[in-house]
Structures are given as structure tokens and as C-alpha cells.
Amino acid sequence: MNFTLKIWRQPGRTSAGTFKQYTIDGVAADMSFLEMLDGVNQKLVRGGEDAIAFDSDCREGICGSCGLFINGRAHGPARGVATCELRMRHFTDGEAITVEPWRAKAFPVIKDLVVDRTGFDRIIQAGGYVSVNTGGVPDANAIPVPKHSAEEAMDAAACIGCGACVAACKNGSASLFVAAKISHLALLPQGQAERKDRVTKMVAAMDEEGFGGCSNTYACEAECPKLIPVTTIARMNREFLLAKK
Amino acid sequence: MGLLTDLYSSSIGKKITVGLTGILLCAYLVVHLAGNMLLFRGDGGAAFDAYADVLPSLLVIRIIEIGLFAVFLLHIVTGTIVWIQNRRARPVPYAVHKKNDTSDPLSRIMFVTGSVVFIFLVVHLNTFWVPARFGDGSHHSMYGTVVEAFSSPLYSVFYLLAMVLLAFHLRHGFQSALQTFGLKNLKYTRAIEAAGLIFWLLIPVGFATIPIFYLLNP
């Protein structure tokens, strides 16, 4: 397959960026989008040009490192996959593909397609954890967890923190990410002790980072590679209100 | 007061404010529509005029009126603040953004539909409320004002158009408010959407019967 790529190039945080056009041929339909970009980079490096910078790590959809805005969609046209799991068969031969970095005030571009997502880390640091004393490992079944809660908590815990929710949202809102983390811990017995404190601090951190608010357009749910439902956002709002009591 | 200002300063608190005032305004629409239906009693407006005359004479209605203005103001001002803050969260736009592939277009234009409804509100108050409240008393009955206003097809069409946009605004707004209060979950989502469907459609259609009636019976 052959493609014409329009890719955002930006040398650094403060420098101005622009779209540059590249062509690539001989792409196999089963290649991932990142493997295709590797091919483009190989060509660039051989020609003495600067390779296109993009984030990736596990390349099997579980780490949350990759994330590109492809043809107007976060993680491209396929549903429930990260960019690394997106295959070239989702595109038509000869298609023009526009690749952009995540765009949000809270996610400034570092270089080309790489954005600074440490805002998410700071939100987690504000309360996205369970404090435990060190010591012997407790027995796995010592604390009973109802099956339904375990399932719902696990669905929320599937969040890999890639930032697609922020990228897709017209408001650049991190609500789905924060809601997933809050839901995950609020549903489990281990999360109860810090439950109220957690939601208050994480929501405050989210606002402080400059993410927008949720206006319930549900664009995030549709683009989330882990298909995290927006019902987690309802739960976050509920937790937030109950914490004010 | 500390709790309220604390709530209002957060993004979720502002959303809850917009949602709560929105639901209160929805409740007001039901009462308003019920009153308006007196127009169709076929008694030459006697019942409607009696209703329109007695309302301002009641102290409790005067107090509710002030509250209603406050709710409108809070809804509009907070909604505008949220809209501005949300726009600021993405200073650099995408070159290509297929927004409507992933979400309801109506959910994305609440500020636009709200603005049109606001313009309608100003015109509407100027036509019916201002002369009745601040007029020199020489104005004819409220029923007469209604008949006169809708004798202009242009006014009727404008009214109808505003009702369409109100329907759009309510369609997203009603269920969105319940999501914001945290009431939506897997169990209730369908029931809420069904209740919302009745609400966003029936209320504007109810109001729209008035200009349609006068357009058909000039």
C-alpha cells in the first residue's frame, strides 16, 4: 500500500511548527501505524534528515505511551485500539493521512508528535493511590470484594493514561481519565479510607492543570482505546458531591 | 457560604450549577406552558386574562419572579464562563477534527442554541412581560397582546424557530444535567433518556402550538 502523509513537525517546545508532506510505499496491510512511521523515519535518517519524534513503548496497547491524532480522530479510525494496535488495513491504498499531536493547553508539544503528559502524573500524585503500610503481603482473599464491584473497578482500571480522552474532547477535558482513576479506587474496599480526600484533591489538580470541563459530549468514550464508559464520569461527579458533605 | 464558593470555583461545581438551574428552568417551562394552554379555551381569552391579571397581584409570585430572574442569570452567566474556560483549554486547534463521528452534534453547540434562546427570551419579555409590568396601564388585555403579536407571521416564524432551538438545547441539556449530578449509571441511563425524550420534545411542541394556531387562523 502507498500513502501520502501530512505530519506535524515542530523542533521544540517554543518553536513554531508546520505540516510536512511525506510519501511511503510498500506498506503491508498488517503493519501497525507505528511500524509504518518507523519506515518513514528509516528513509528520513538515511537521507540525513531528522526523524519524526513520536512516543511509543510496549506496542501492544497496554502502556499508554503512544497517541497520535490521525485523520481527525484520536488513535485513528479504529475503535477500542491504541495507535500501536491500529493496522494499515484500516486505511485505503493511496489515502492521504494527516497526523497531529494531541492538542490541549495542558499537553504542550515537546517535539513533533510528542506531548508533555506529566499533567496526568501530577493528578495521580494528588490522590490517585492507596496508602498502605509496608509489611508482609496480605492474603489475596482476606478482603472480600463483591463480584460486581470487582468487574466495574477493573473496567475503570483498564485506563492506560494515554490522553486520548483529552485529545478527542472539544474542551480538552481530562474528566474520563480522572473519573476512571477515582471509580477504580472508590469501588474497592482498599480505596475507602482516602475516598473523599482523593476525589477533592484529584479534581482540584485536574482544574489546576488547565484541562477543560466536561460538557457531556461523550467524544472521549468513543475514542478511548480501553472503551472506558462515561458512567465513570457520573460516578466522579457523585463522589465529588458526596465528599462535600 | 464557604462550601458554595468552594463548589462554584471547581469545574464540576460550575457544571452542577448550570445543570441545577437548567432543571429549575425546565420546571418553570412546564408551569408556563400550562398557563399558556388557557389561550385555547375558546372563551375569547377570558380565562387567560384572569390568569394573567391575578398572577402579578400575588406577593408570592413577585418573590418567585425575582428568584426566576436570578436562576436565569446564574444559568446564563455560569454557562458562558464554562464555555470560555473550555475554549481556552485548547488554544491550538486541530487541522482535521472529525468531531461529529464520535458525539452528538447537539451536545457540541449548547452555547449557540442557548444564545439564540437568550435572544428569543429578550424579545419575548419585551413583547409580553415589559408592557404588562411597566406599561402605563393603557395596554389592552394580555390576550389582546398575544393576538396582536402573533398577527405578524414574521413574529410567529421567529417564535417557531426559537422553539426548534429550545428543543435542541433541552435534548442535550436535560439528560446532561442528570449525568452531571451523577445520577446516570448503566441501570438508569435508558430511563433518563426516555424521560428526556418526552421532555425535550413535548415542551417545545406545546409552546409551538400557539404560533401554529395563529398562523393557521389569521
Image: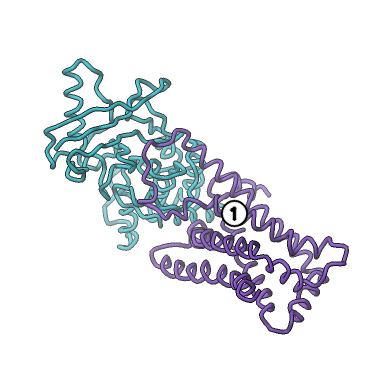
Chain colours: A cyan, B purple
Residue A212, image x, y percentages: 49, 42
The residue carrying mark 1 is: B116
Residue A69, image x, y percentages: 32, 38
Q: In the figure, is residue A202 to the left or right of A133?
A: right
Q: Is residue A184 visible?
A: no
Residue at 47% over, 55% down: B106
* Front position in the image: A70 or A242: A70
Residue at 32% over, 49% down: A157
Within the image, what quadrant is residue B135 found in?
bottom right
Residue type, mark 1 in image: Val
* Front position in the image: B135 or B154: B154
Residue B35, image x, y percentages: 68, 75
Query: Where is B110 relative to B154, above or below?
Result: above
Q: Secondary structure at mark 1?
A: helix
Within the image, what quadrant is residue A64 found in?
top left
* Front position in the image: A215 or B155: B155
Residue at 68% over, 53% down: B73
Residue at 33% over, 48% down: A223
Instruction: Point out the residue furthest to the front here.
Output: B218
Q: Chain of mark 1?
A: B
Residue B127, image x, y percentages: 73, 62
Count numbered badges in the picture.
1
Instruction: Point out the residue furthest to the top here.
Output: A48
Q: In the figure, is residue B172 to the left or right of B28?
A: left
